[in-house]
Amino acid sequence: MIVGRVIHGAKIGRTLGFPTANIAVSPEALRVPFGIYAAQVLERPAAVSIGVRPTFGKDLGPLLEAHILDFDEDLYGRELAVELLAFLREEAHFETTEALRFQIARDVSDARAIWARVVR
C-alpha cells in the first residue's frame, strides 16, 4: 500500500481526457520499480504511473509521484492510499499525443479488467 498526499500538477491529464491525481510520496514508501500498474484507489480501479517527475517546483526538488488516471474529482490536498494490484508495463515515451492517449486508454482498460478479477 502506498499512501501520499495529492499535490497540484500541470493538469495535463485533463487535456488528454484522463484526469490525473499526482501523489507525492516519500522514497521510503515507494519500494517498487517505476512503471505502469493496475491499482485500486478509493475502492475503484485505476491505472497508476509511478516514476520521478522533477517538474513540480524548483524548491521542492524531485518528487516521486503516482499518477492516478481515470478519476474526475477534486482530490487536491487529500491523502490517498494506492493498492497496487499488478504490473502492466514499463514507462515509455510517445511521439504523439494520440499515441499517448491510445496507450492510456489501453492501460485503464487493462487495469479495470485486473481489478474486476482480483477485487470483486
Image (tube, rainbow, N blue to C red):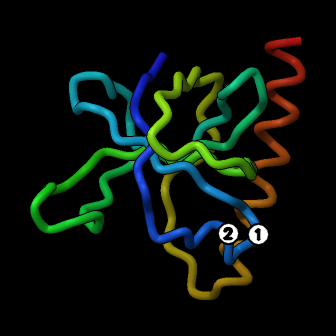
Q: Where does the image place residue 70, in percent across and percent down from the top left?
A: 75, 50
Residue situated in front as seen by the camera: 26 or 11:
11
Q: Residue at x 28, y 68 (%)?
A: 55
Q: Where does the image place residue 36, in percent across and percent down from the top left?
A: 56, 45
Categorize mark 2 by other alpha carbons within 10 Å: few (<14), some (14-19), many (20+). Answer: some
**What element does badge 1 sit on?**
loop
Residue situated in front as seen by the camera: 33 or 101:
101
Q: Do tag 1 and tag 2 residues touch (Cβ < 8 Å)?
A: yes
Q: Which residue is mark 1?
A: 17
Quarter assignment of residue 12: bottom right
Q: Amino acid at mark 2?
A: Arg
The number of callouts visible is 2
Is 71 placed left or right of 117 in the picture? Answer: left
Q: Where does the image place residue 73, in percent across and percent down from the top left?
A: 71, 48
Q: Residue furthest left?
A: 59
Q: Which residue is mark 2?
A: 14
Q: Quadrant of the C terminus?
A: top right
Residue situated in front as seen by the camera: 76 or 30:
76
* On screen, residue 86 above or below 57: above
Categorize mark 1 by other alpha carbons within 10 Å: few (<14), some (14-19), many (20+). Answer: some
Is 68 placed left or right of 91 in the picture? Answer: right
Q: Where does the image place residue 24, in percent across and percent down from the top left?
A: 35, 41
Q: Which mark is residue 91?
A: none
Q: Residue at x 80, y 14 (%)?
A: 118
* On screen, residue 24 above or below 10: above
Marks 1 and 2, how far apart at CA: 5 Å
Q: Amino acid at mark 1?
A: Gly
